[in-house]
Image: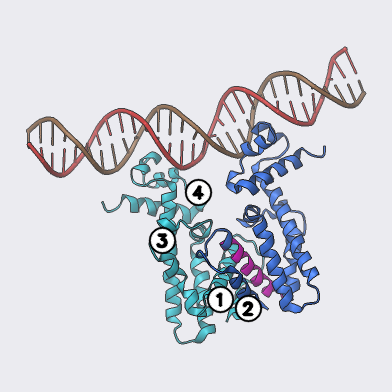
Chain colours: A cyan, B blue, C red, D brown
Amino acid sequence: MTGRVDDIVAAARTVVESHGADALTMQAVADQLHIKAPSLYKHVAGKRAIEVELIARTLSEMGEALHAAIAAEGGGGRGAATAALLAAYRRQALAHPHLYRLATAGPLPRDALPEGLEDWAGEPFFLVTGDPYRAQALWSFAHGMVILELDRRFPDHSALDRTWAEGAAAFA
Amino acid sequence: MTGRVDDIVAAARTVVESHGADALTMQAVADQLHIKAPSLYKHVAGKRAIEVELIARTLSEMGEALHAAIAAEGGGGRGAATAALLAAYRRQALAHPHLYRLATAGPLPRDALPEGLEDWAGEPFFLVTGDPYRAQALWSFAHGMVILELDRRFPDHSALDRTWAEGAAAFA
DNA sequence: GACGGCGGCTAATGGCATTAGCCACCGTAG
DNA sequence: CTACGGTGGCTAATGCCATTAGCCGCCGTC
C-alpha cells in the first residue's frame, strides 16, 4: 500500500538525475529495484505515467523554491524581488538539470497534473511583476536562459551572470 | 553525384515538418524515397547525420530571416529594430515549428556545423542591442517565448502578442 | 568483354516499451 | 486448517527502431 509506486518514482528520479532523461528506461528503473521491467506494469500504467509523476514533483519543488525566494525578499522592492526570483529559478533548475529539462520539454500533461499546480508554480512571476503579460515575458526569459545554459547553447566562456543581470535590469 | 544525400535530407525535412521530429525514422525517410531503410546508410552515416544537416539548414534560414528583418528596418531606431527582430524570430519559428524545435533542442553539434554559422545566425541580436550580454538576454527571451508557445506551455487564451510586446518594451 | 563500384536488397542483431500468461506466496473466509 | 483469490513477481513474445553484414545487378570504363 505504502509504496511500490513511490519506490518506482524514486528509482526513476535517481536514474534521471544521474544519467539524464534518455537513460530513463523501464529496464533501468526495474534494475534499481532488483525487479524485471515487465513487473513495473503491475504498479504503473507505463513509462509516461512515471514521467508525469516526475514532472509534477519537479514543478512542485520549483514552485516551492520560487515562493520561498520572494517570501524571503519581502521588503526589498520590485527590482530586488525580481532579482531574487530569477536567482532562485536558476539555482533550482541548475540543481536538477535533467529533471528541469524533463519537466519543461514538450507539452504539459495538464490532465494528469494536480489541479492548480501549474498556476501556483508560475504565480511568483506574477507576484513580482504585478502584471500577467510581464510575468509571462519574465518567465520566458528565465526559461530561455536556463534551457540554453543547460544545453550549452551559449558560446563557451559566456559570462552568464552578467546576462542574467542584464535581463533582470530590463524587467525591473 | 548531386543528389542522393540532398534527396534524403529533403525527405527527412518533409517528414519532420509534417509529423514532427519524433516521426523522423529511417523507415519514414526511406519510404518517401521508395527505398528500404538500410539503403540510406549507403549515403549518410546515420540518423544523427541527417538531423545535423536539418539543424544546419534551419539555423541558416533563421539567420537569413533575422538579418533580412533588421536590414529592412534600418532607420527606425533601437526600439523599432528590436520589435522587428522579435517579430521575424517568432514568425520564422512558427512557420516551421518542428524544425525549430529540432534545431534548438539539446546541445548543438558544433563540430558538424559550418564554421561561423552559429555566430552569424545570432548576430542580429547583437546588432540590435549593441551589447553582447543584452543580446544573449534578448535571445533567451525570444527563444523562451517561442518554445513555450510551441509546446503550449502558456495557459490557453493567453494574449501572446501582448506578452511579446511586453518583452520588446523591456529590452528596448 | 571483363571488372569494379554504386546503390539497391534481405537477413540479422540488439535495445526499447509493452502485453500475455504463468505461478508462488499470503492473508482471510469458511 | 484448508481452500481461494488477489498481489506482485516471472518468462516469453511482439513490434518498432537503428544499425550492420553480406549479397547482387547494373553501368560505365578500360
Single out the mark in the foreground, 3 or 2: 2
Q: CA distance from mark 1 to mark 3?
A: 26 Å
Residue in the foreground of this view, choosing between A92 and C8 = C8
| Residue of label 1 | A134
Mark 1–mark 2 contact, CB under 8 Å? yes
Chain ID of residue with mark 2? B
Q: CA distance from mark 3 to mark 2?
A: 32 Å
Q: Earlier in the sequence, mark 1 or mark 4?
A: 4
Q: Is residue A155 visible?
A: no
Q: Secondary structure at mark 2?
A: helix
| Residue of label 2 | B170
Q: Quadrant of residue B35?
A: top right
Mark 1–mark 4 contact, CB under 8 Å? no
| Residue of label 4 | A23
Residue in the foreground of this view, choosing between A29 and A43 = A43
Chief SS of the magenta region: helix
Chain ID of residue with mark 4? A
Amino acid type of the residue that numbered disc 4 sits on in the rendered structure: Ala
Tell me which segment is drawn in magenta.
Answer: B131-148
Residue beneath the point at 63% across and 78% down: B170
Q: Quadrant of residue A150?
A: bottom right
| Residue of label 3 | A57
On the rendered structure, is B103 left or right of D5?
right
Q: Is residue B168 visible?
A: yes
| Mark 1 Cα-neighbour bin, 10 Å: few <14, some 14–19, many ≥20 | many
Viewport quadrant of the N terminus of chain B: top right
Amino acid type of the residue that numbered disc 3 sits on in the rendered structure: Arg
Residue in the foreground of this view, choosing between A105 and C25 = A105
Q: Earlier in the sequence, mark 1 or mark 3?
A: 3
